[in-house]
Amino acid sequence: MTRLALAFRLLADLLFHGFLAAYWYLVHSLPAHYAALGALASLVIYRLLRPRVPLTSPVVLWLVSAALLFFLMLNPLPNLRGVALLLWFTACTLAFRLCFAALGSLKLKGGALAVSYILFLLLPLGLPRLWSIEPTVAADRPLDVAVVGAGFGGIAIGKELLDSGITNFQIYEAAPEVGGTWWHNRYPGLHVDVRSSLYSYSTFPNPNWSRSWAPRKELLEYAIQASEAFGVRPFIRLSTWVEGLQFDEQSGLWQLTVGGKPVLARHVVLATGGLHIPNTPQFTGADTFKGTTFHSARWRDDVELAGKRIAIIGSGASAVQVIPEIAKIAAQVDMYQRTPNWVSPQDNREISTVRQKVYRYVPMAYKLERLRTYVFSELGFRAVFPMESTRRAQVEQALGRYVNATIDDKELAAKLIPDYEFGCKRPLITGHFYPSLNRPNVGVITEGIDRLTPSGIRSRANIERDYDVIIMATGFRLAELPFPVTGREDQSLAELWRDQPEAYESMMVHGYPNLYLMSGPNSGLIGSIIIHIESAANFMVQVIEKAGDAGLIEPRLEAQQAYNTALQENLQQTVWAGSCKSWYKLDSGHVVANNPHPISMIVYDRMQPRWEDFLFSERP
């Protein structure tokens, strides 16, 4: 074999094993250094053994073995983590390479890959669990884990618990169906503002998205399907309210008040999300308004909007999706804008039937599309959101041109261009909002609101406008807990967080052992929240397993303080610490909503808990 051929073969080997390392890291949460070590070790050992191992078994055995091992190389047992997962991947890869080499001809190798392809279609979720996943909840003993919320976060932690063999847990959901945000929010035009391929579980691809940014109906259906596919559904109690949470120092257990009755649990996961408590401003005269008022997150399907005069208070994410839809049927729609937002155009075209079939029958195609979206999200964050970014000005200029090119009224266009840095407030993405403002029945009011009157709204310019319906598109109270949470020494978490919410890795709080927060302080990020949810669930289950049945675990105070000091220092180097006033930060400048790091860094940091940062003790 010539040197060129040898070099080409070595390069092909390196590319293949590099792909494996990336796949193990991104899809199966194997720590990056483990993934690199496993890929390199399997390559080196293979090249050493290949000339020395006699491969004389029947061809059919090699073909079947190669096909099965190729599947196993990408789909481990669900409960493997850390070193065990590393050994699985390394062993399967080494064995696959040896079996594949034994096939010799390209025809036989193609046959092995074809058989493996069939396995991928038959087992889209990977290897099934080899143990029972029936609930083992009993009235006379505490739950191992109580989960509050059955949105995407609650479903994700339920899957991780089942993958770890934990079946004594319960998920409490106040709504009559799973889905969280996508059940509670149902206003017209609602769709996700992250590409659907990334706003989905890494282990549960959905080839059936109808659009690049999926509508609410499909997201809710996907959540229901995921709860069933993961085996989580039997563990969920729907229409069940959790009213409070108290740590009992005498027993070392958490006591939940569920429907007025106590429930004991060793561990509690709050997966209540950040978009569940509407922020409803209290306007003077609100009680005198004779029309109908409601928040966009509590949409009134029973209120007829056709032919009505409607005021939308707010100009954020909900408003820019609602207005284009209701403007089609309303007599008049006025948006009351306090501060303009940066809005990016969106080409949310339909995904063709052909592409859906490709995603369905070529699973790797969907995963590559997800990876592509992931990479562009990462690059976008790194290019635009650091405070010293030189690209942000170009983005602002481009979006300013977009406003001027789309809005017919140039005076209105000037009112829609923000005077603060792109990203300082939440950037919005839609292709329909600005065109809808050109309609003759849509107005933008920037005078501010003085009070509500019996017939409508009086602005601070002393102009009174009459309305039939007022819709509050005023966002959510992100830092507010859904119910009282009390830890050691009767410390209220709401009181502790009153001035400055903080948590360790956004997930745990000193003084609240065995309590985990799926959407705690500084858990916001640029990209898909599902990636955060999956990494958080993986982290939490590792901590739960470490504590065991009899242990209590919580972050050390000094570790929590050091984490947040470094976090805030890094946040000051991002655009979220910019000149605007936003729900991302307090008046003091302390950023409470977002994480300063790109998603890949967050995921990497959480893959293996730093056990020296924790306090361990035995339950009394």
Image: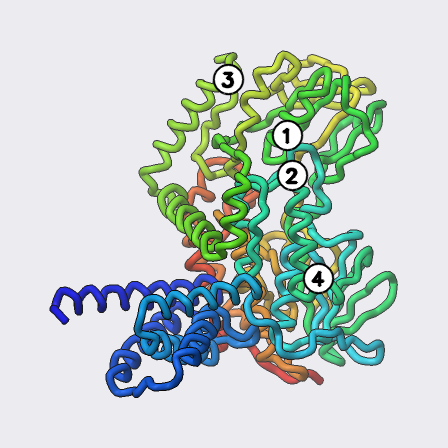
Mark 4 vs mark 3, CA separation in Å: 50 Å
Task: Residue at 84%, 80% (x, y): give it.
Answer: 140
Q: Which residue is mark 1?
A: 314
Dot 3, crowdedness within 10 Å: few (<14), some or many (≥20)?
some
Q: Which residue is mark 3?
A: 407
Query: Residue 1 at what x, y percent from top left?
Result: 14, 71
Mark 4 vs mark 2, CA separation in Å: 25 Å
What amino acid type is highlighted by mark number 1? Gly
What amino acid type is highlighted by mark number 2? Gly
Foreground tag (4 vs 2):
2
Do callouts 2 and 1 mark residues in contact (Cβ within 8 Å)? yes
Q: How many marks?
A: 4
What amino acid type is highlighted by mark number 4? Ser
Q: Which residue is mark 2?
A: 475
Judged from the image, the secondary structure of the residue bearing numbered disc 1 is loop
Mark 3 vs mark 1, CA separation in Å: 19 Å
Residue 299's place in the image compared with 502, above or below, is above
Foreground tag (2 vs 3):
3
Do callouts 4 and 2 mark residues in contact (Cβ within 8 Å)? no
Query: Residue 597 at what x, y percent from top left?
Result: 43, 54
Mark 2 vs mark 3, CA separation in Å: 25 Å
